[in-house]
Amino acid sequence: MIGNFEYSNPTKLYFGKDALSNLSFELSKYGDKVLLCYGGGSIKKNGIYDQVITILKDCGKTVIEDAKVMPNPTVEKLYEGCKLAFDNKIDLILAVGGGSVCDYAKAVSVSAYCKTDPWEKYYLKMEDVDNKIIPVGCVLTMVGTGSEMNGGAVITNHEQKLKIGHVFGDNVFPKFAILNPEFTYTVPKYQMVAGIYDIFNHITEQYFSGDDDNTSDYIAEGLMRSLIHSSKIAVQNSNDYEARSNIMWTSTWALNTLISKGKSTDWMVHMIGQAIGAYTDATHGMTLSAVSIPYYRFICPYGLQKFKRYAINVWDVNPNHKTDEEVALEGLKCMEQWMKDIGLVMNIFELGVEEQMINDIAKSCFILDGGYKKLSNDDIVEILKKALN
Ligand code: NZQ
Ligand code: ZN
């Protein structure tokens, strides 16, 4: 491990079938006014809304509802939430939903008291928070993003064709998160597998970088093996508690800052995926799966030894009598087969991208340089063309 780092994670997690019973204790730490954020209505159909409302009422809270947080929350919705939170002098924001609702809650928490335009401040200028932050708690209903235990808050601006994530510090992490794997049983299969790939890609984004011997990489390999194993069970039987609970826990660890410690990270699949998301509003995990194989084939020669290690340690490729390149490519083939088997979208055409959009998507893509190769605009165009079908 080469890098210096600080590590702390202030989010208190409650995990398991009885996790929600801890909500009243957490609520007792905050004032009366709770902004209850949720999505398009899934929590009303599966009964989670009723359970949460009963606890809020029993605790004597005044609940202000902020519903219809859309997947890939928009800047317009953020402005609405800020007004609600500010006007009602909210004491706690309770997010009940997936990554979109949790991200949105965090974005509102730092923006409600922001004196300037939060989109410009946090997303275009990437400035830090210097105003009051409203505490956030999460009841997670869909897994993938890790938003329940991190400072990420991704917002989409359709007018500017930009989807940008600000990773806030640990003062913005949720104060608590309630994780009951059974709450995820009703997630549609498309969303479930998109979430599974989001988790996987969070791990690979942090794994494919650097050439030092890093503890984080060994943890990453274990997480990937667990996820591959449980994903195969969950696609067969979505109510398998053991598999769903392992996926939920892996999801949290994949992006709660631990496995990035002491090393550089890549994140270019996410940058390309987010640019596609800004143009198509497609499901986040599918924007990642659709470009991953062309991206990893493209950078494989620049990080050959790591791709070889990945093939052997994650996919059990036998390296005997093969060149390094053959081993590495066999690993990517195994990954591609697994992705197809669990039902991921493997091309961007299916997400609504057409050839004439590719140059614009590439132009709006942020380029980072923590991976094995800093991409040029032409490289991104080439990868997107390969991902087209
Ligand atoms: O809106 P409702 O009706 O609740 O339906 C949602 C939504 O349509 C549904 N859903 C959630 N829980 C359900 C359920 N349906 C039935 N039963 C349940 N229990 O699932 C759909 C998708 O939900 P969403 O929250 O959008 O999914 P996800 O968790 O994948 O979040 C995606 C957002 O998170 C951002 C993405 O960019 C995207 O905006 N990300 C956040 C990150 C972070 N905070 O660190 C990192 C990620 O890389 C990602 O960028
Ligand atoms: Zn992601």
Image (cartoon, grey):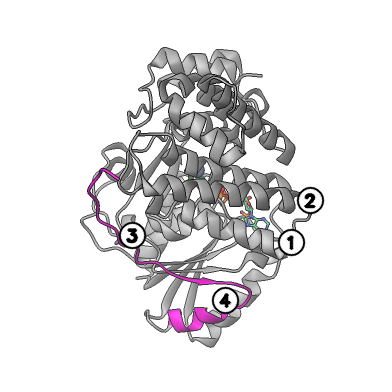
The residue indicated by pointer 3 is 172
Residue 373: give x, y in percent of width and height. 37, 22
Mark 4 vs 2, N-terminal side:
4
What kind of residue is marked 4? Answer: Leu
Q: CA distance from mark 4 to mark 2?
A: 27 Å
The residue indicated by pointer 4 is 20
What kind of residue is marked 1? Answer: Asp
Q: Secondary structure at mark 3?
A: loop
Q: Secondary structure at mark 4?
A: helix
Residue 5 is a magenta residue: yes
Q: Which mark is in front, 2 or 3? A: 2
Q: Which mark is in front, 4 or 2? A: 2
Q: Which mark is in front, 4 or 1? A: 1
Mark 3 and mark 4 in contact? Answer it, CB < 8 Å. Answer: no
Vertical placement of 250 versus 75: above or below? below
Vertical placement of 101 versus 90: above or below? above
The residue indicated by pointer 2 is 236
The residue indicated by pointer 1 is 240
Q: Secondary structure at mark 2?
A: helix
What kind of residue is marked 3? Answer: Val
Q: Which residues are magenta?
A: 1-27
Q: Secondary structure at mark 1?
A: loop
